[in-house]
Image: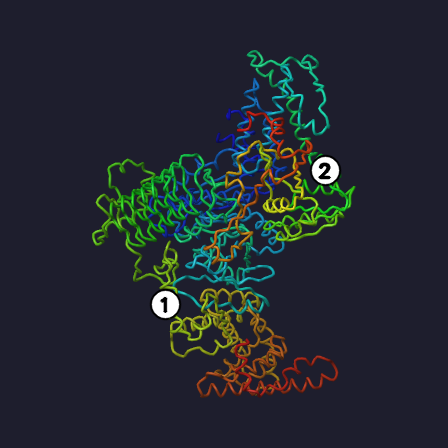
Amino acid sequence: MGPKSNTGKEKLLDDEAEVLQAVILADSFNKRFRPLTTRKPRCLLPICNAPLLDWTFESLALAGVQEIFVICRSHPQQIKAKIAESRWSKPGSGIKIVPILTAKETFSPGDAMRDIYTRGLVTGDFVLVMGDLVSNIRIDEVVKLHKERRKENKDVIMTMVVKESGAKHRTRSKADSAVFALDPVTSECLHYEPIMGYPPSTVASIPREILIEHPDIEIRNDFIDCSIDICSVEVPSLFQDNFDYLDIRRDFVHGVLTSDLLMKKIHCYVAKDGYAARVQDTKSYESISKDILSRWTFPLVPDNNHPAGHLYEHRRGNKYIDKDGTVILARTSTVGNNCLIGSSTKVSDNAQIISSVVGQDCFIGEGAIIDNSYIFSGTTVGPGCVIERSIIGSDVNIRENTRIDKGSLIGDGVIVGPNAHLEAFGRLSKKRASGPEDGDENDGEEDDEDYADSDEEEVEAAQDSITVDLGTDSNAIVWPHGVADEDEDEDDVENAKNQRFMRIGDSASDLAYSDAGSESSGQESESSDDDGDFGERIKLPTSTSTSLDIPDGASPDAIAEEEFRNEVRLSLERAFAENHSVDNAAVELKTLRMASNVPLSRVREAVVAAIVERIKIIDGGGAPQRQEIFHVISRWGPLIDRIGGVDPVETISALQTHCSSSTRLLLFGQIVAALYQTDIVEESDIRKWHESPVSHGLGLPPGERADNHKKCREIGSRMIQQFDEQDEDSEETEDEGEEGSDEDDDEDEDSSSEEDEGSD
Amino acid sequence: MASDPQSAANQRIVEDLVSRLRRRQLVGSRAAALETLLVLRQVVSKARSSNINQLVNIIRAVGRRLVEAQPKEHSVGNTVRKVLHHIREEYHTASEKPVVESSFSIAKFVLQGQPRKQTTIVRSGSEARAPLKENDPNDPDSFARVLKPVLMEAIQDVFDELETVYDNISKNAKDHIHSDEIILTLGTSKTVDSFLKAAAHYRNYTVIVAETAPSYGGREMAKSLSSAGISTFLVPDSSIYALMSRVNKVILGAHAILANGGMFATSGSLLAATAARSYSTPVVVCAGQFKLTPLWNLYHEHGALDFGDPSAVLGFDEGDLVEKVDVINPYYDYVRPELLDVFITNYGDHPPSSIYRLLKETYDDEDNEL
């Protein structure tokens, strides 16, 4: 059937103007599901009795995707086999699925994107999703929107699909979410700030430049990030150019949004209808299972369009029992609401199943209680067992009277019991090579095993130190509780405490509350008052004031800044000497700024300083001096506004700061005048600067510098007086006195200037 | 069978429809019926069969596949049954077996007013066509060659019937609606819409439309009716009972008419029908023939009501509530036959008690289970 159906399909595809392509990253690049994922890739774990990958395919098919590339890294053979045997590869499915095996060295989504680029897989706009997506959003409409935007502006490279959910929704990950700043009209994403459960954050900072350009912004902390991205072809190439991008959100989105060089735009699509979520950890596994059972994913529900093709009967109270009549429910057994029971499963007398999913061919013994748990296929639960909020792999045998507490994960093929008790959050997997029958695996699979088992070996080696009674017949090894490594980076999403937010059954309430309290009392006393709920306090960095606090002490930052200033000086000297164009010099400065990662205000200071130093001091001053100043400013002044943001007030402040510690103190007035003449600063800017506390030399130690600062300000006062006089003259003739009229009498009102601090 | 390219092509169009039905990309009984018919036409035109049983089996297999894909869209199965019925009829005519047409067709009785002596046209096979040969080893294609044009014609008949279903139903609209009456309806139904509009040509009357939460189909319906110049009121569902005393007639659409005379209809219909019963207001159901479903026990099945997603009732953004509340949002209500007075179909007007008869004439008994 292969070749024939392929040609037919291609013919079909040719008819369409454009084939909608999708790329699935079928690897999680993390280990949150261990030990369930030691022998199986995460995307093949069943959720509601169908592999995650099938849910993803179905979600994409619903959106009219015609060609799917599946990027697989761990256990690629299994994924390939699964795709080959699934209904998607049958003729008439209308979808072409191509598994792509990527190198084992692909350790992050970024690497996978680079791989996509090198292989040249995508030809147009494509949909990028993870292999653990469950969605019924009409992605094709988002694609249409994206294409329209692209027509207007080529710089729009990506549209992220997010779902409104409310901050405390069960499906929203506390451990790995984000604050989005959006333009409410265009829904352009202006700022992205990732948030973790631990360390908790109480502050999100929005860069000031955004506020200048966008009078209205929406700051949202109630989105589920579904990781559905509509990407243009440029996206993989951007990953290729920036080889340090690892994560699509944290690195790529953040990088693109903060970059001055790329000038690319990312939009958000806020899905109001529909459902989309990712099974990114065991906690979301639970909540998405529940969402599916309570039909939020309609029409993707067990009794209609089940991705694995099973047919379930929908009974009152959202109970789903396989339709083929092979399920045996004992008369005295109880199946509660929101349950799913797969075919050929037998539930014995007095057993209770509450809000759980039981796979196919399972056996639930007499009097067993299964509460909010997820049991994969082929598992036997002995009589009298109690299982709470846990995930049990396939072909597990839980012997009689075993108790499994909440949050436990039990890997495939484990035998536990009898009469054992597994404490909360226990993790078990089968001993490797326990039987001789494991030896006859073929080479290809063995490769996988070796690769996957490096962790397992470690765990096995540590078994001696763990003494947990798992019953006489057990073949299980116990995985240690996630203890924080010494060298672990707290900022990493995978840090041990943050992982607790991702665990099934773990409310992590001790972390969420105690730490938030201690943190805020340690740092900012006022922050604990106003964020009792999860609301974000938005702090606006007052970067105007940052120009002052250059410490004299040589902290590492200061050294880096010193280096940067040196670089800028050298680069500008070169520019002056070789008479570069202002544009070229600006590009060079931007690159420098990116390289040493310093705020914009530092660049401004450095540029102003360099330009001022460029002015030759002519003995005697007077007209020749003024001419020299004007010459330099008119040639190089525009550069100040080209470095990535226009802020004349800051320019004057920088000038003041520089002049007060330089031999060109006397030139200050003339330079300001020259800046004014070349329209780099306006009259109102001079006034604003004059009012600002910076101009008073606030925070400077008393001494020569502070005195010089004052002198500069006096010069400013004199200029403003002149302006006022001019205004009075001109007010009679032309009506342009608006600036003068609302600001005319505040030149000496020092008391008012303190209040203005926050307004900039 | 799957090996030859023709059936592979068949397979593809069938699978295409199957996946669209599964994904609910194809909604609406009539649209589904039309699509099914198109697929069946394709299948029949390409099917290779040397006797009637093979052909019937092929069609049944396709039908089963389609019905399994979306068991709640009954018009799909009904269309398949209808086509099978027609094919057998044509076959019997062609093979010159005695035409066993019942002389007391209820549809004809209703439409023509009186039992007439059946003018059974016993078409003689020798008229224009070659004699029908089945299982002829020398000429295996002869069966298909002879019968195919007739079958295509038969399918075309079903097709035409579907095309004209609204006109045929609304033909007698003026006999049901009188001047200055107040009619209550709910939900959006193309059949009811054209029925009311047809009546508006002759009569001056008022329609009250319940807005039918949570789908709010009533709003569209009210818009469409008022744009046709009918005096229309849009009311919330909660006031149906209060208004019922002033209503002369309730006109509803149906999703499926069951063999016992009951029906599945937009949720809210049961409310309206029950309220109407307590005021003895007549309840009239307008539905095309393709909604006649030869199943009678569906109302035992909880799932048959077709539950949608809860988001129309409770927003997904109500994070806290989503966890604690189970919301059910059924698309349909089952309305018992006792609550209904008459079905207006393109086969004439029938009381619920004679629907079983109509079904027997429309479909063959052996197709009830596909």
Task: Report the number of numbered marks.
Answer: 2
Q: Is residue A236 visible?
A: no
- Please state the horizontal and vertical placement of residue A517, each as a whole percent of the image: 39, 70
How are the residues colored? rainbow
The image quarter containing residue A555 is bottom left
Badge 1 element: helix
Q: Chain of mark 2?
A: B
Q: Chain of mark 1?
A: A
User: In this view, which residue lies farthest toward the right?
Assistant: B202
User: For the residue carrying disc 2, how many other residues have a C-alpha within 10 Å: few (<14), some (14-19), or many (20+)?
Assistant: many
Q: Is residue A572 visible?
A: yes
- Please state the horizontal and vertical placement of residue A214, each as a whole percent of the image: 58, 66
| Looking at the image, residue A739 lies above or below residue B109 | below
| Looking at the image, residue A640 lies above or below residue A162 | below
The image quarter containing residue B60 is top right
Lateral position of residue B5 relative to residue A474, left or right: right
| Looking at the image, residue A394 lies above or below residue A187 | above
Give, as a three-letter code, the residue at label 1: Ser
Between label 2 and label 1, give the one nearer the viewer: 2
Foreground residue, A420 or A333? A333
Q: CA distance from mark 2 to mark 1?
A: 71 Å
Foreground residue, A190 or A274? A274
Q: Quadrant of the C terminus of chain A?
A: bottom right
Label for residue A514? 1
Q: Which residue is mark 2?
A: B170
Badge 2 element: helix
Give, as a three-letter code, the residue at label 2: Ser
- Please state the horizontal and vertical placement of residue B18, each as a whole percent of the image: 54, 36
User: For the residue carrying disc 1, how many other residues have a C-alpha within 10 Å: few (<14), some (14-19), or many (20+)?
Assistant: few
- Please state the horizontal and vertical placement of residue A717, each as a whole percent of the image: 59, 87
